[in-house]
Image (cartoon, rainbow, N blue to C red):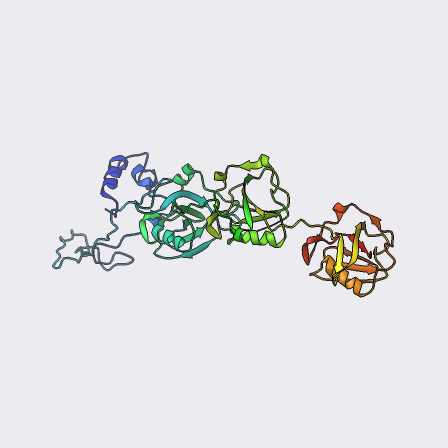
Amino acid sequence: MNGWNTATLASAVTQCVNNDNINGQISLCPPLARSQTPYASTNCPERPALINEPVHGLIAKLPGCNNITSGPARAPPGVCATQPAMNPRPQSSGQTTTSPAVGDKLSASSPWAYAGCAAEGSSQRTLTGYSFSANNMTIDYCTATCKTKGYPIAGLEYSRECYCASALSTGTSFTNSDTCASTSKMICAGNATQWCGGPSLLTIWKDTSISATQPTTSPAKGTVVYNGCYSEVSGRLLNKDSYANATVSVDQCAAYCQAGNYAYIGVEYGGECYCGNTAPPTSQAAADSTCNMPCKGSVAQVCGGSGRVSVYNNTLYAPTRNVANVTVNGNVAYNYVACYKEGTSGRALDKGASTSSPQMSVETCASFCAGKGYKYMGVEYGQECYCNNDGLINGAVKADEADCVTTCRGNNTEWCGGTSRINIYTRP
């Protein structure tokens, strides 16, 4: 019977034997055609022999008690003095691999539901949180491992690989359900009744017991306040600074944006963080329900969605300013003048002293210049300090205040000039 299911084989005999249109091709016989996939050798491996006798390669005699007899006379009937031993029938014999529909639970008591399939990304994995491979891989094994690791999404691939994440990677998406259903897949290495994806194809399950929500209490130790969910229309909603990784949470993003003294904090697509100082327009406000992706770094928090940003107000934000009166040792040492453009023939505050530091602030520069007895001081490019007694020279001209908008490296609440732009201060 060649290991075929009896009912399947009977149907094949009825439909395909003595059928000139099929001519013995298994792939053209409807009852057998379903077994002809690129993964037939994996999904339909040769079963162990039921009779304990050699059946591979060059064998000394025919199976059973059929001795080879030289002709031309007929061979005598084979007589088995001892019946061949029978091997136990595999427990998996006759079991069927099931194909779940989207939403089907792994079992009645399991929180894991089938979500569909997705192709691997071209530049990165579709699920990037945690992964492992095992020769006894099953859906149960993969989902249990992902849950232990804190991830609500589990994906199986290539029969024995498991991937976990809080959301699909940027640029990847679920395959159309009809395409997914018709795509050939591989059985799980540890359970022939389950599908475990295929080459560069994930079959994905979601933990329905984890429902990330917008916080009812403020995260980041109460230093941010939820503003709302917003859609991105053209360009980034918050465009001053950003990063992305597999550990993003609201708290982590808030700490990053607060360190840069940004007014607004935004999290998107499960693992992206954005900072900005411009309030998101009300015209781009979206329903909170559309910001529904768990954060990769904290599945209990929401980190926006696809084209959706969860925005928070930074209560620690201090508007960046020019220091009107700069004190040194408790006394006013310099007063602010204006923003100037460097001259064409040299520095605006040449013929004096200068210093540069990644900890530069207006006060740091004032202390340096006052200590050397200079009347004028200026800060430029975020970390440069210049002093002299001659004032503005070398053709320096007044510039728009909006040109001096580089924050000081040592104090991001103060302006320290810009590119070829210098904030000038003078002694009272």
Task: Say which quadrant the C terminus sits in.
Answer: bottom right
Q: In this view, does 271 lie to the left or right of 407?
A: left
The answer to whether residue 244 is seen in the rendering is no
Give the residue at the far front of this rendering.
330
Residue found 60% across the figure and 42% down from its top: 237
Q: How many labels does the image show?
A: 0
| 211 up-or-down from 394: above or below | above
Depth check, front residue: 171 or 195: 171
Q: In this view, does 116 lie to the left or right of 54?
A: right
| 392 up-or-down from 290: above or below | below
Depth check, front residue: 61 or 68: 61
Residue found 77% across the figure and 63% down from its top: 368
Q: Is residue 78 left or right of residue 369?
A: left
Give the residue at the far bottom of this rendering.
372
Q: Residue 376 appears at what percent x and percent y?
A: 83, 58
The answer to whether residue 426 is seen in the rendering is yes
Depth check, front residue: 422 or 121: 422
Q: Residue 83 appears at what percent x and percent y?
A: 14, 57
Q: Residue 261 appears at what percent x and percent y?
A: 63, 52
| 314 up-or-down from 27: above or below | below
Q: In this view, does 91 lie to the left or right of 361?
A: left
Q: Residue 251 appears at what percent x and percent y?
A: 53, 52
Residue found 26% across the figure and 46% down from its top: 95
